[in-house]
Amino acid sequence: MGQDDSPASYVPRRPSRPEFLEIRGLRYHVHHWGSPEWVTPDSPALVMLHGWMDVGASFQFVVDAMASRRYVIAPDWRGFGLSEAPQADSYWFPDYLGDLDTLLDRLLPGQVVDLLGHSMGGNVAMLYAGIRPQRIRRLVNLEGFGLPASQPTSAPKHYAAWLDELKTPQALRPYPSLQAVVQRLRQNNPLLRPEFAAWLAPHWSRRRDDGLWEILGDPAHKRRNPVLYRKEEALACWAAITAPVLWVEGDRTDMARWWGERYPRAEFEERLQVVRQLERRVLSPAGHMLHHDQPEAPATHLHAFLR
């Protein structure tokens, strides 16, 4: 996929090794950095979970910046990257938990791991660490804020909206060239370095038979989850986490841009109070894609926190 890369494209210091394996009936794509032989009780495998409309390759810059060698695994979630999409018209959040649990059993059976998640991946990581606390030694959450609290009374309208979306074809905009994908990445995130964007673009998209470039994400991801987000259930999982947790955010992230008054910052701060052992870091300048904006900084914090 790299034949159209810009000459300024980033060159990884630690290239990943790809693997395809079956996870719950789907062909999953997984990135491996380093070797399983590097795993010790004090340095378990580090599993990295990407966010919505992202890919596992997104963590390449952080892996390259890490000071110590670690065995790192980063899957493409179902319907993202090179992982297969299910034959379904919408996605259910518990499936990510099922995929993660199966992935760990396949690749790291019986092993305790360090778990890192960004955005949606951070939300999955927080839930999983409370559901399977015995599997997690350290947990790192990069801006996995959770979602606005829902009310049972909103269920009728929410389900009705989901039913309407099922009748509406979903699509992602194609791009005329790989350079147009690069421009889209930089438009979404002005802090993204040009060489990073040039490297990410062919991992984030692929060329179709008609010559256009499509994003490697199932359009069905755009449909809402039919099941309401239940804050109380999520916090019960957060409260059950026994691993130390490192929360990392960017100084330019504005929650109000996503949710307005439906999920104020003060409510998120209240939710964090249920986490037993919490450290916090703020990166600057950095936005929501902080692992792209400042990969050296989270790598430094990881080194201190995970050791």
Image (cartoon, rainbow, N blue to C red):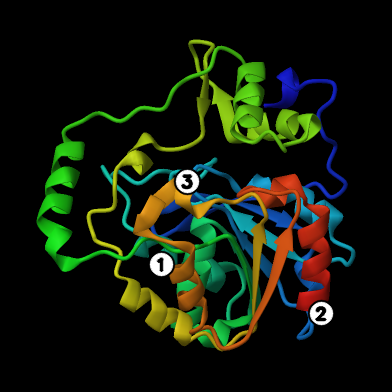
- Judging from the image, what secondary structure is the residue with disc 1 in? helix
Q: Of the numbered discs in the image, which one, if any, rests on residue 257? A: 3
Q: Where 74 falls versus 36 (above or below)? A: above
Quadrant for the N terminus, please: top right
Percent position of residue 306, x then y: 76, 76
Q: Where 286 falls versus 150 (above or below)? A: above
Relative depth, front residue between 124 and 101? 124
Q: Please name the residue that numbered disc 2 is placed on.
A: 307
Q: CA distance from mark 2 to mark 3?
A: 35 Å
Percent position of residue 160, x then y: 11, 47
Q: CA distance from mark 1 to mark 2?
A: 28 Å
Relative depth, front residue between 191 and 62? 191
Q: Please name the residue that numbered disc 1 is placed on.
A: 98
First along the sequence among labels 1 and 2: 1
Q: Where 117 falls versus 80 (above or below)? A: below
Crowding near the residue tagged with mark 2, few <14, some 14–19, many ≥20 C-alpha atoms within 10 Å: few
Q: Amino acid at mark 2?
A: Arg
First along the sequence among labels 1 and 3: 1
Residue in view at x 53 percent, y 17 percent: 175
Residue in view at x 16 percent, y 67 percent: 152
Instruction: Decide if residue 200 is on the left or right side of residue 11.
Output: left
Residue in view at x 57 percent, y 82 percent: 135
Residue 301 found in image quarter: bottom right
Residue 219 appears in view: yes
Quadrant for the C terminus, please: bottom right
Residue in view at x 53 percent, y 83 percent: 275
Percent position of residue 61, x then y: 78, 48
Pointer 1 and pointer 3: residues touching (CB < 8 Å)?
no
Q: CA distance from mark 1 to mark 3?
A: 31 Å
Percent position of residue 45, x then y: 71, 71
